[in-house]
Image: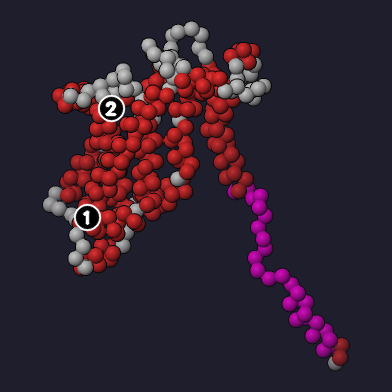
Amino acid sequence: MTMTASMTGSAPVSQANEPRGPRPKPFFTPKKIMIYSTLIFFSLYFLFPLYVMVATSFKTMPEIRFGSIFALPNQINFDSWVRAWSTACTGLTCNGLAPGFWNSVKITVPSTIVSIFIAAINGYALVNWRFKGSELFFAVLIFGSFIPYQVMLYPLVMITRELGIFGKLEAVILIHTIFGMPILTLLFRNYFASLPQELFKAARVDGAGFWRIFFEIMLPMSLPIFVVALILQITGIWNDFLFGAVFAGTHNQPMTVQLNNIVNSAQGTPEYNVNMAATVLTGLVPLIVYFVSGKLFVRGVAAGAVKG
């Protein structure tokens, strides 16, 4: 009986020492290998041209001619960056990209602020202050965003000429503001529709009006979608070439138009290091804006920017 008791008593001890719960999964599973391999491949695919541009911009012309395009520069040289900014020829003038940079700032800042503010009001009104014909208004507004810009170029030229602003920065600002509102209105409408309606109803019961609810309740809750709209507008307006080339005039060309003039200049031998430096400088502002506010951009999209 003693042996039996000792044998039966040892069973629970051995079972208690056995590990419980699911077995830990190995990190390198076939699914994870496939996902990470795909992500690495596409990351390299998109980052490789950027590497070539940056590496080439720091090289001298003899090193570019007789070296490999994929090799790192033997010695970092900032002369091409200085020339691209201040002395590169952008047509008849050789003032670099600096004038175009300030023209792009003058176009982007007011266009972004005005279009986002108007679109926020539109989206807020379409959700919480519906008026007669609001759905038709929204449908027409969204339909207008699908019309190609090229179809409207000639009528817009005629309109801006009659307004006396053709060839001025005001024309580009007006056009970017108008064309940015449809898609931004859709984003704000969907975002405001995802917010709890009880907040709006409670504010209405307390006697708050249109503007008080908008500024004191809706705007403080709308930071993510404002960041989404900000990134979309800055990226689209800063990188625009068509409207800047047509409506800005020769003395108000934005940075993208001047970059095209530098790259396609027929004077002398093409300076690839200057061209690459000018390209990186032109795309630097949207990249900085995106990297600074990238997390809020994802939050804004996830919080209702694509919800109906």
- Which residue is denoted by mark 2 in the rendering? 169
Seen from the viewer's position, the closer of residues 42 and 257 is 257
Q: In the drawing, what numbered circle is on residue 223?
A: none
Q: Position of residue 233 (x, y in %)?
A: 35, 38
Question: What amino acid is found at the position of numbered circle 1 in the picture?
Answer: Trp
Q: Assess disc 2: are there few (<14), some (14-19) or many (≥20) residues with their C-alpha within 10 Å of its C-alpha.
A: many
Task: Please indicate, yes or no, whether residue 203 appears anywhere in the rendered image.
Answer: yes
Task: Please indicate, yes or no, whether residue 185 appears anywhere in the rendered image.
Answer: no
In the rendered picture of this protein, how many numbered marks are placed on residues?
A: 2
Q: Position of residue 232 (x, y in %)?
A: 37, 39
Inter-mark Cα distance, 2 to 1: 31 Å
The stretch drawn in magenta includes residue 116: no
Q: Position of residue 81 (x, y in %)?
A: 52, 23
- Which residue is denoted by mark 1 in the rendering? 211
Magenta segment, which residues?
Answer: 4-31
Answer left or right for 35 relative to 85. right
Mark 2 element type:
helix
Question: What amino acid is found at the position of numbered circle 2 in the picture?
Answer: Leu
Quarter of the image for residue 162 reads top left
